[in-house]
Image: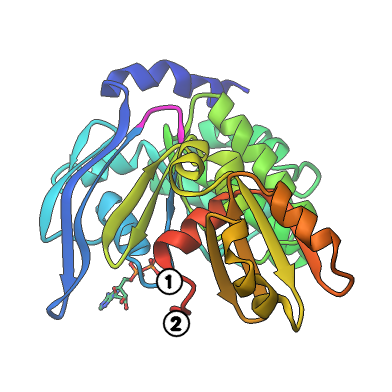
Amino acid sequence: MASLNAAAADTATFGGAALQVSGLRKSYTGQTVVDGVDFTVPAATCFGLLGPNGAGKTTTLRCCLGLTPADAGTIRLAGHVLPEQAEVARTRVGVVPQLDNLDPDFSSRENLLVYGRYFGISDAVLRARIPDLLDFAGLSGKEGANIQSLSGGMKRRLTLARALINDPDIVFLDEPTTGLDPQARHLIWDRLKRLIAHGKTLILTTHFMDEAERLCDRLAILDHGRLIAEGAPRELIARHIEPQVVEIFGDAATTWARRRQGLGERLETAGDTAFFYCRDAAPLLGALAGTLTLRYVHRAASLEDVFLKLTGRDLRD
Ligand code: ADP
């Protein structure tokens, strides 16, 4: 579709970086919530910002959109310096907020039309663009549908279509699949991959490590306002975690595991589960084969292992 293809040609105009953040700081009432954050998002890639609740992700993204003034640091978004050029930068950006804030008084088509007018786009251009966007979102035939009649997945996809109404180069997505069932999540992932393939830059926050692993070329983990790791998902796993993980569950699992700590490079326990991190899991699997009562899973190390190792297993409320 024409409006998606246009982005690839534009990427050259900002020297390869869609977003450059350097030395970003923000405090609220004396508490530092973003504490010297630096990262760069190359154009036409997908970048994930991960972190426990309260880590500073939303504040960072709000600063990057020019919605919250930073205390210090420099931000270039789509080649424009923020906050001075925030208004022009935002014309190149689409936003999918965490909660769908579609207007319930309007149909699907009207939601896109009204939103597009905020960018000063003519009704003629919008009317030409909307059928393509609804088709992209899998909402053909739902042009006149009342918002309340749409499922959660449809609303998310309509919000995504709305974020594309100004044909942005960069799309910010705040937890794009939270609250969706697996089918709806897969459909959103498919559409996001299509956007990346068409040269859009995606910047997303998510609590789903599988989502980050699937979609992101690079990601950063933020905790207590600081970036504590950054890299490609596979790189981060290789850098921080032994390649094989064996999870052992059940009443006697942690006691059994502590007595055999030497069978893995690292052992962690959480509740009634023991996590062995191993370079070679064969000896441990051999020992487990001799037990009748313990249940276990042998799997490859994942991004979630990295996240939990770096940010801990304690609850953040
Ligand atoms: P995250 O998105 O990673 O959950 P946030 O950026 O929302 O983190 O919040 C980081 C910290 O900043 C939290 O302690 C939060 O309570 C605080 N905070 C965020 N926005 C404000 C605000 N407008 N006023 C005061 N404190 C805020």
Task: Tell me if I can see residue 57 in this picture.
Answer: yes
Kind of residue at badge 2:
Asp
- Span shown in magenta: 42-46
CA–CA distance between discs 1 and 2? 7 Å
Task: Tell me if I can see residue 101 in this picture.
Answer: no
Residue under the image location 66 percent in, 80 percent down: 255
Query: Does ligand 1 reach within 8 Å of label 1's beta carbon?
Result: yes
Question: Camera-side residue: 13 or 29?
Answer: 29
> In this image, 229 relative to 141: left or right?
left
Asked whether residue 210 is drawn in magenta, I would say no
- Image mark for residue 317: 2
User: Is the residue 210 above or below the residue 275 in the image?
Assistant: above
> In this image, 185 relative to 44: left or right?
right
Residue under the image location 77 percent in, 50 percent down: 142
Asked whether residue 43 is drawn in magenta, I would say yes
Element assignment for label 1: loop
Element assignment for label 2: loop
Image position, residue 275 (x, y; %):
62, 65
How busy is the neighbourhood of tag 1: few (under 14 within 10 Å), some, or many (20 plus)?
Answer: some
